[in-house]
Image (cartoon, helix red, strand yellow):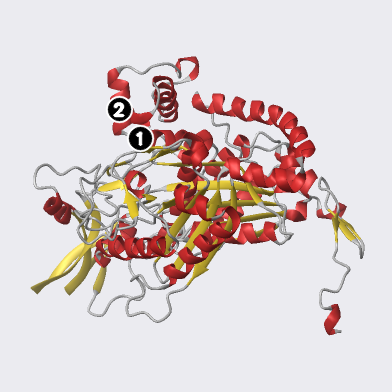
């Protein structure tokens, strides 16, 4: 009997705002919400963006403030807080020469070692020297336009580094700290209680970034330092590693001493990490798994790289799609006429527990993850091109869904969160996979959503965006339409699919299953099967019985109340970010050791394995 990985909390931040309590999801479907829900959503965003604070951070927004909130969220023109895409600094190489020779003065301390061939140097007084040479190679400050003008940015005015003492932290790690903190506080159960109940060695953390940390505080500064004439800092290399989102959360948010890892699978990285956590719980290697990813790709070098590949929607190509005025809010266009994807930044986190522990702690049940399937593409002509592996992952997820919930649920009560990257190649290949497999499993008009239309492609965190959106759909019943396109492209396969360009409302009780599909550069394909809250509760009741479930419901009341208290504070802009730098350090001299157990001060005892797992081979 395998344990069921139950989603007990989730949190994070992306261009739609805060993820916990479905706040970011509500921004996607704002025009279908009730007046009360709309006011709450806009008010929460206004507080997050620093437009309203304290006791004044609730209630209806005036027209001007509402406009600022709407324009400052989701995909939009790239803001200068990152760089000015119209005038981005770079160095222009040049060779200077003169038949009679070049003469210039410079500080003696700035002389290169060794002196270049042909340099004649003489003292000029005042610590300066006079140099004469026939030619000189120089790098001239210059500026040019980067042909990518839009991105899925965090809400305008919201700076993650301002929420805690983030000195010298790359932006991606700032996001990781905030996102994990949001998830932990939204759980409604004290983390210390979780550790005591699960045991410190029964907790797994899996999180990563795909691009590593490439801003000046991470690998970007590390690689640029010599060319910029500066020194590498002691932090840049360490903080640049793509495992740091997990490492930071272990060290500064959770104080975790359990299992940890950082699985990278390009754009499918979140699902690769989710797979590791799900399998830990299913097979009894952990009772709690914290899954996350964080990506902050808005640095010129990353945008240059993707743009040179032809992967991003550039200004010139977008103008061909928009004969009139260029609409930079509609550049991410899954399954429509498109010309490349739109980068986004964000972080998403989920806390999974096995079903028994979730009942014991009275934890909230937002759904469960039955399985995550990953397959490579085999032989390829281009490392970035899609391949056949995604047929395997989607087919496995569909087969598992049918085995768990039955044909009726699969065929009538499921939907898919497509990768929907907004490239011409993706719209053809992914729609063909989904369409053919829908026919194979007897699914007619299978609902297809694509959250990248709203928040862009957040790379490692992209499937986290899909998961958070799926949980919102289960809770509210509104499937977000692909509102950035007017019609589907002619080459999209949709005989058996319902790729809606407008929001579709369903009774949440009629939605049982969600498939999350992801396709990453290099042949990293992943598909996850997520079960709805009501289906998860039904399965738990069948396993554990009515009496235990009734006791759980009573204990859950206090959890709901505690979680709601955090949501109320966060809606006022009070995120209370968890950041425990140098707190409660373990004195290694006080660690108690025996052949049976290890006890760390402040933690429950960890028992050591005593049985031989290969007994039949000895």
Q: Which numbered disc, 1 or 2, marks the residue closer to the eye?
A: 2
Picture layout, residue 240 above or below residue 164:
below
Which quadrant does the C terminus fall into?
A: bottom right
Q: Is residue 27 left or right of residue 409?
A: left
Q: Nearer the viewer, residue 210 or 332?
A: 332
Horizontally, residue 491 falls left or right of residue 471, namely left
Q: Which residue is mark 2?
A: 68
* Residue in the foreground of this view, choosing between 94 and 536: 536
Label at residue 156: 1
Farthest residue in the left direction? 99
Q: Is residue 384 left or right of residue 394?
A: left
Report helix, strand or loop for mark 2.
Answer: helix
Q: Quadrant of residue 41?
A: top left
Percent x, y for residue 604?
Answer: 84, 48
Give whichever of 60, 316 is nearer the camera: 60
What's the residue at 85%, 66% (across, down)?
A: 609
Q: Residues within 10 Å of mark 2 (few under 14, many from 20)?
A: some
Quarter the N terminus occupies: bottom right
Residue 546 placement: quadrant: top right
Regarding residue 238, the answer to whether it shows in the image is no
Label ID, residue 134: none
Q: Does residue 373 appear anywhere in the picture? A: yes
The reply to whether discs 1 and 2 touch (Cβ–Cβ < 8 Å) is: yes
* Residue at image location 49% in from the left, 53% down from the top: 410
Q: Residue at the location (65% across, 25% down)? A: 561
Q: Estimate how packed mark 1 is, as few (under 14), some (14 to 19) or many (20 or more) residues with alpha carbons within 10 Å.
A: many
Spatial CA distance of label 1 from label 2 is 9 Å
Name the spot of residue 24 as percent of width and height, x first.
44, 37
Residue at the image position 49 percent from the left and 43 percent from the top: 511
């Amino acid at each position: 009997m395998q344990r069921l990985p139950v989603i007990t909390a989730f949190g994070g931040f992306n261009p739609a705002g805060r993820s916990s309590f479905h706040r970011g999801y509500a921004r996607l479907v704002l025009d279908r919400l009730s007046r009360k829900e709309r006011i709450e959503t806009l008010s929460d965003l206004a507080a997050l963006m620093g437009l309203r604070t304290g006791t004044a951070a609730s209630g209806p927004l005036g027209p001007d403030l509402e406009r600022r909130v709407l324009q400052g969220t989701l995909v939009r023109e790239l803001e200068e807080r990152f760089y000015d895409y119209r005038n981005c600094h770079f160095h222009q190489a040049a060779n200077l020469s003169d038949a009679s020779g070049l003469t210039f003065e410079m500080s003696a301390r700035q002389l290169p070692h060794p002196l270049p061939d042909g340099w004649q140097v003489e003292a000029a007084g005042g610590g300066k020297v006079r140099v004469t040479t026939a030619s000189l190679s120089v790098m001239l400050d210059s500026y040019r336009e980067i042909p990518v003008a839009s991105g899925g940015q965090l809400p305008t005015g919201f700076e993650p580094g301002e929420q805690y003492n983030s000195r010298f932290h790359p932006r991606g790690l700032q996001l990781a700290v905030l996102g994990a903190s949001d998830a932990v506080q939204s759980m409604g159960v004290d983390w210390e209680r979780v550790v005591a109940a699960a045991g410190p060695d029964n907790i797994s953390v899996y999180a990563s970034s795909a691009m590593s940390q490439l801003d000046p505080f991470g690998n970007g500064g590390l690689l640029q330092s010599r060319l910029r004439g500066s020194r590498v800092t002691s932090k840049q290399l360490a903080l640049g590693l793509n495992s740091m989102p997990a490492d930071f959360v272990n060290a500064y948010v959770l104080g975790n001493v359990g299992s940890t890892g950082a699985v990278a699978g390009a754009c499918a990285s979140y699902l690769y990490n989710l797979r590791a956590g799900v399998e830990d719980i299913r097979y009894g290697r952990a009772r709690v798994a914290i899954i996350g990813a964080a990506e902050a790709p808005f640095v010129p070098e990353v945008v240059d790289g993707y743009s040179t590949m032809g992967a991003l929607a550039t200004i010139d190509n977008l103008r061909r799609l928009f004969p009139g005025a260029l609409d930079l809010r509609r550049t991410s266009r899954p399954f429509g006429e498109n010309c490349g994807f739109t980068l986004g930044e964000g972080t998403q986190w989920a806390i999974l527990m096995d079903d028994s522990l979730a009942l014991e702690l009275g934890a909230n049940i937002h759904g469960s993850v039955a399985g995550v399937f990953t397959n490579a593409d085999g032989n390829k002509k281009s490392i970035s091109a899609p391949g056949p592996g995604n047929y395997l992952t989607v087919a496995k997820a569909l087969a598992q869904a049918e085995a768990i919930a039955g044909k009726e649920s699969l065929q009538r009560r499921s939907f898919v969160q497509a990768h929907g990257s907004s490239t011409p190649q993706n719209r053809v290949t992914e729609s063909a996979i989904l369409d053919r497999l829908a026919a194979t499993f007897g699914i007619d008009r299978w609902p297809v959503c694509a959250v990248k239309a709203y928040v862009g492609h957040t790379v490692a965190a992209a499937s986290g965006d899909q998961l958070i959106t799926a949980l919102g759909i289960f809770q509210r019943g509104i499937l977000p339409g692909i509102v950035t396109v007017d019609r589907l492209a002619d080459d999209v396969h949709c005989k058996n699919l319902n790729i809606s360009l407008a929001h579709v409302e369903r009774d949440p009780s009629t939605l049982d299953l969600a498939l999350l599909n992801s396709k990453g550069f290099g042949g990293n394909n992943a598909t996850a099967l997520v079960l709805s809250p009501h289906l998860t509760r039904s399965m738990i009741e069948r396993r554990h019985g009515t009496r235990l479930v009734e006791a759980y419901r009573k204990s859950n009341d206090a959890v709901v109340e505690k979680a709601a208290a955090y949501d109320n504070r966060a809606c006022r802009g009070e995120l209370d970010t968890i950041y425990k730098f140098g707190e409660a350090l373990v004195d290694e001299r006080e660690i108690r050791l025996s052949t049976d157990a290890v006890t760390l001060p402040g933690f429950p005892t960890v028992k050591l394995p005593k049985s031989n797992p290969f007994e039949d081979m000895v």
